[in-house]
Image (spheres, rainbow, N blue to C red):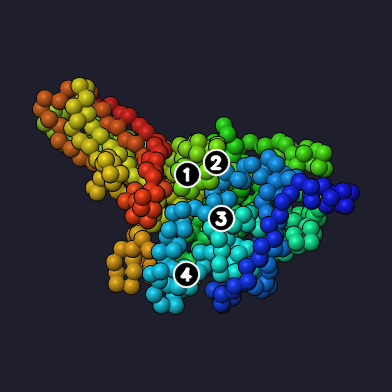
Amino acid sequence: MRLYFKSMFYVMCSLSLLSLNASFASDPKEWSPTWKLPPGKRPENIVDLPITVPGDVRISQFFSPISCGSCHPEIFKMWSGSTHANAWKNPLFQALYNLGKKTAEGESQKRNIESCVRCHFPIGHSAGDANLPVDDEKGGVICDFCHSVRATTGIGNAPYILSPGNAAAMEGGIKYGPFKDSPETIHGSQYSELHTRSEFCGGCHDVSHAGNDLPIEQTYTEWRQGPYNTNDPETTVHCQDCHMRQRPGFPSTGSTDRPDNPGLASPEIMGGKKRPHIWTHYFVGGSVSQISLPPNSEVQPQMAIDRLKNAATLEVVANPNAKKGDILKFQVNIKNTGAGHYLPTGLTELRQMWLETSVTDAEDKIIYQSGKVDEKGNVDPNATIYHTVFGDENGKQTLHVWTATHIISDNRIPPKGQKEEHFVCLIPGDAKSPLKVKAVLHYRSAPQDIVDTLLGEKSIKLPVIDMAEILAEVNL
């Protein structure tokens, strides 16, 4: 049977066996985890062993995604439209990464820029290859990276231990995943509890500055310290329970149902078994634009909108006794009802989430307005942006994360938490009752002016997504 699958694989797949011969220096201590689960609470494959460092493996050992897609066509199709598939090719990432390589000064900043590759092209980094083409078919977070992770040493800064096969010799090796009874084909299979838990995602989705240890991206930590992590296996909601259950029509957030996805990991003719649940591989977050997603992404943009629209809710509290000529006081409560991490999360120095509010009378006369976006895509400077602000060594605000040395502010919203925004405006004497108080919570992946600067003539207009909206009336 194994020989049958190997022969079939030769016919169905076209493998790229290019291995680049340049290498760069790297201190393994740079990739030490930022946090470790206490002993007794770890999956068996979170271990105290040396991690995979540059030069430990070769790119040619890993199968290309299209090769994996020969036996896993549905999963490959999901993945191929995802941000994981585009992690290395993403034009905005490439522009920021190359800017960092040109402008980073000193060992700390340069070390941090180098660390980007560890997660955005993990097998390239692990191979120690310096010249990594943007269009490399094995770039990004590919199938054979995730399923070759035998173990990790903890959380954060990608402390993974890889055990690939040898694609050049058509030896699949062992692939690690969520099932205990997968049939052997071109590769063996081994159950990995790690792959079913947030600790797997936390390898890359928890990042500290490689030069000064400043927390930069803390998505796993936000989950770990939040209410979705109950420390009870029966009630804990892991990253996978939202982000690998979503499929078209099922947002699978903390505020919606997260139903099972019955199906097969591979066709029955390939030995696939019908299972009550197959983890989806769309890997949807808040990315909507074709900058973050591959050109062939078909369903992910709408799925991201669905996810964003099920992440938060709004509530308006207004003075019910307001009169013409008085001051109207009203409050908008923003509640994180659907995300297991802060809103927003990830590259939070770039993410933009903000309120647009307006007060109009019965004839639609504008009495108050804030949070609008102008023709150039700039958000009203008086609006509150929910994000993280980093500072450099001179105390100045910076979006260049490699120069960051401290956090100036962080006003994001924790899971199941809320923020309150207070507003006041004068009610004109000729206002027509009732007044309409409207609030819309917007989201955009990055400021438009930053995108324009980084991408130049190749820039596109990033979409602004309405996450939540509410309208309240005040009778005069």
Distance from the alpha carbon under mark 2 to that under mark 3: 16 Å
Which residue is disc 4 drawn over? Answer: 112
Up/down of 189 relative to 129, above or below = above
* x, y percent for residue 307: 50, 39
Which amino acid type corresponds to the residue marked 1 in the rendered image?
Gln
Which residue is disc 1 drawn over? Answer: 290
Instruction: Say whether disc 1 or disc 2 marks the residue closer to the N-terminus.
Output: 1
* x, y percent for residue 230: 58, 51
Q: Point out the frontmost of discs 1 and 3.
A: 3
Report the front residue among 325 and 391. Answer: 391
Report the front residue among 25 and 136. Answer: 136
Q: Point out the frontmost of discs 4 and 1.
A: 1
From the viewer's perspective, is 269 left or right of 383? right
Up/down of 440 relative to 132, above or below = above
Instruction: Say whether disc 2 or disc 3 marks the residue closer to the N-terminus.
Output: 3
Distance from the alpha carbon under mark 4 to that under mark 3: 23 Å
Which amino acid type corresponds to the residue marked 4 in the rendered image?
Asn
Mark 4 closeness class: few <14, some 14–19, many ≥20 residues within 10 Å: many
Residue 155 visible in the shown view: no
Report the front residue among 476 and 30. Answer: 30
Q: Secondary structure at mark 1?
A: loop
